[in-house]
């Protein structure tokens, strides 16, 4: 009966044909007279068949697109919440766009998002366009894309192991040289932290910090050190 997936389920006894109810199935699986050989795992094909049967015979329903999910949506309920753009499946708890049933994509139309999902090149170009102030190609031409965080304008490409200045593209194999370039040409290492300046001792203190502490760090105002 379970293997055949014949729906609706009816009793196979001669001259009976009575339909099985949910309570009948619960009794077979969980009741005092349950069948020891009939497990929930063996009933899984029946669950899948039941969902397929339900969807084929009721066009007002649709299945959750998440793989291996048995969740079902009512189309009229989806249309009621589509303006909110996100609905949640009660079964798998995944969020979906109420219009196209793909992942939520706030700020991007369903048509554009579908193109981005199917076209990696288009997706990359869209990302670069929306982050053009924070993403640039490595100036050496190695093909790597570098995304800048906050603060320091010293950048390091892990593909070709080149250090470079975010502001103008000056590059070197030495990060100390890039720090020196930032200090001498741009007057600051980061976007918000000016270089050390204290009673004309900028060169002495600045070079000491750059030479001895050669990590990608932010340097505070010298007046805060004393």
Image (cartoon, helix red, strand yellow):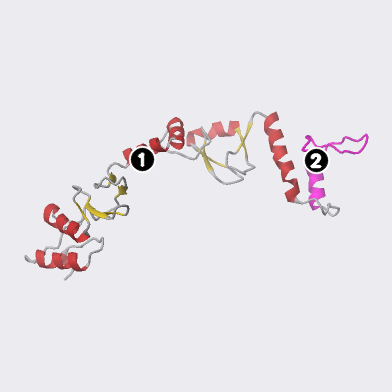
Outermost residue to the left:
200
Q: Which residues make up the magenta segment?
A: 1-30
The residue carrying mark 1 is: 127
First in sequence, mark 2 or 1: give its number. Answer: 2
| 82 drawn magenta | no
Asked if residue 82 can be seen in this view, the reply is yes
Asked if residue 224 can be seen in this view, the reply is no
In the image, residue 110 lies at what x, y percent? Answer: 46, 32
Task: Name which residue lies at 32% across and 52% down.
Answer: 159
Pick the front one: 64 or 183: 183
Q: Which element is circle 2 on? A: loop
In the image, residue 12 lies at what x, y percent? Answer: 88, 38
Task: Name which residue lies at 79% across and 34% down.
Answer: 8
Outermost residue to the bottom:
226
How many angstroms separate mark 2 from mark 1 (CA)? 52 Å
In the image, residue 113 lies at what x, y percent? Answer: 44, 35
| 29 drawn magenta | yes
Q: Quadrant of residue 90?
A: top right
Q: Determine whether, in the image, residue 196 is placed left or right of residue 7.
A: left
Q: Which element is circle 1 on? A: helix
Pick the front one: 169 or 16: 169
Q: Quadrant of residue 206?
A: bottom left
The disc at residue 25 is none
The residue carrying mark 2 is: 21
Q: Main secondary structure of the magenta part?
A: loop
**Quarter of the rendering occupied by the C terminus:** bottom left
Task: Name which residue lies at 72% across and 45% down.
Answer: 44
Q: Determine whether, in the image, residue 155 is placed left or right of residue 25.
A: left
């Amino acid at each position: 009966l379970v293997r055949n997936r014949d729906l609706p389920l009816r009793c196979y006894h001669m001259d009976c044909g009575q339909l099985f109810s949910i309570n009948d199935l619960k009794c077979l699986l969980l009741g005092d007279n349950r069948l020891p050989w009939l497990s929930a795992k063996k009933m899984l094909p029946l669950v899948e068949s039941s969902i397929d049967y339900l969807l084929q015979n009721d066009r007002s329903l649709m299945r959750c697109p998440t793989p291996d999910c048995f969740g079902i949506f009512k189309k009229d309920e989806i249309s009621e919440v589509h303006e909110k753009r996100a609905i949640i499946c009660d079964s798998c708890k995944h969020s979906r766009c109420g219009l196209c049933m793909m992942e939520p994509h706030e700020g991007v139309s369903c048509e554009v998002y579908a193109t981005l999902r199917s076209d990696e090149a288009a997706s990359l170009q869209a990302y670069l366009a929306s982050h053009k102030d924070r993403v640039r190609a490595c100036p050496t031409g190695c093909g790597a894309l570098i995304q800048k965080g906050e603060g320091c304008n010293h950048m390091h490409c892990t593909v070709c192991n080149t250090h470079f200045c975010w502001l103008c593209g000056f590059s070197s194999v030495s990060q100390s040289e890039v720090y020196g370039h930032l200090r001498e040409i741009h007057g600051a290492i980061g976007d918000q932290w000016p270089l050390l300046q204290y009673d004309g001792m900028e060169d002495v203190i600045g070079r000491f910090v750059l030479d001895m502490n050669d990590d990608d760090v932010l340097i505070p105002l010298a007046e805060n050190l004393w």
